[in-house]
Amino acid sequence: MAPKYTLHYFDVTGLGEPIRFLLAYGNIEWEDIRYDDDEFEKVKSKMPFGQMPVLHVDDKIYAQSTAISRYLAKQVGLSGKDDLENLLIDQAVDLFHDFRQKIGDWFYDPIPASKAAKVAQLKDHFPFYLNKFEQIVKENNGFLVNGKLTWADVFFVAPLNYFKYINKRDFLEGYPLLQELVKKVESTPAIASYIAKRPPGGRPGA
């Protein structure tokens, strides 16, 4: 009997969206429970580490977006074929975390002076990371690892709308290979079907 999956995350794309994409890709049924900020505060203490996303697998709860995505990738056939390919996938995913952490450090900084300083730093961070990703895709025939779709591509593409939203711009302009990668992932039939019917999100564009 297939396990029962229940995902808990905010009503945005963000780090919960790779999990949704992977579940959709595998044609897995799941309950998609979405929270606004006030709702999350009421259930935060019940989360293993006080944060989301979390995934219920039957009656057990699991945390951390990367760990959950890696698990689901194995279930749906988007892991690497061997340890070296999995290393390349993890490398790409960790690079994405480095990139999104730079954005998060700026966006969630509560101190106006330091937040303003980080705006200038982002002008350097964006081309540094995006050039790296563009080059990786170029060297891997249109994907992040070995010329084929893996969960690294899903993990890169799925949360981008949220990060574009908080930056108020499409930072992939000028990176045609990354734009094409987004199209490839989002046009995968099962993922495209999910995107077509997903809720619009609690924050427009997110």
Image (tube, rainbow, N blue to C red):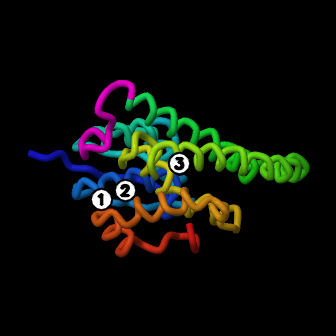
Q: Nearer the viewer, mark 3 or mark 2?
A: 3
Residue nearest the observer in this picture, 144 or 159? 144
Q: Quadrant of the C terminus?
A: bottom right
Q: Secondary structure at mark 3?
A: helix
Kind of residue at badge 1 = Ala
Q: Secondary structure at mark 2?
A: helix
**Residue 145: quarter of image:** top left
Taking depth in this image into account, of 135 and 86 the one nearest to the observer is: 135
Span of residues in magenta: 73-84
Which residue is painted at 49% across and 62% down in the image?
180
Q: Kindly identify which residue carries mark 2.
A: 20
- The residue that appears at 40% across and 53% down in the rendered structure is 8
Q: Residue 176 vs residue 31: left or right?
A: right
User: In the rendering, at what x and y percent does residue 163 appear?
Assistant: 62, 58
Which dot marks residue 24? 1
Look at mark 3 in the image and give the residue it sits on: 138
Q: CA distance from mark 3 to mark 2?
A: 27 Å
Task: Identify which residue is drawn at 55% across, 63% down.
Answer: 161
- Mark 1 Cα within 10 Å, few/some/many (few <14, many 20+)? many
Left/right placement of residue 22 relative to residue 4 reads right
Q: Which mark is residue 147?
A: none
Task: Indicate yes or no whether the magenta region holds residue 204.
Answer: no
Query: Judging from the image, what secondary structure is the residue with disc 1 in?
Result: helix
Q: How would you rate the neighbour count of disc 2 (Cα within 10 Å): few for under 14, some for 14-19, many for 20 or more?
A: many
Compared with 157, 60 (above or below) is above
- Among the two numbered marks 3 and 1 on one chain, the one whose residue lies closer to the N terminus: 1
Asked if 71 appears above or below 110 in the picture, the reply is above
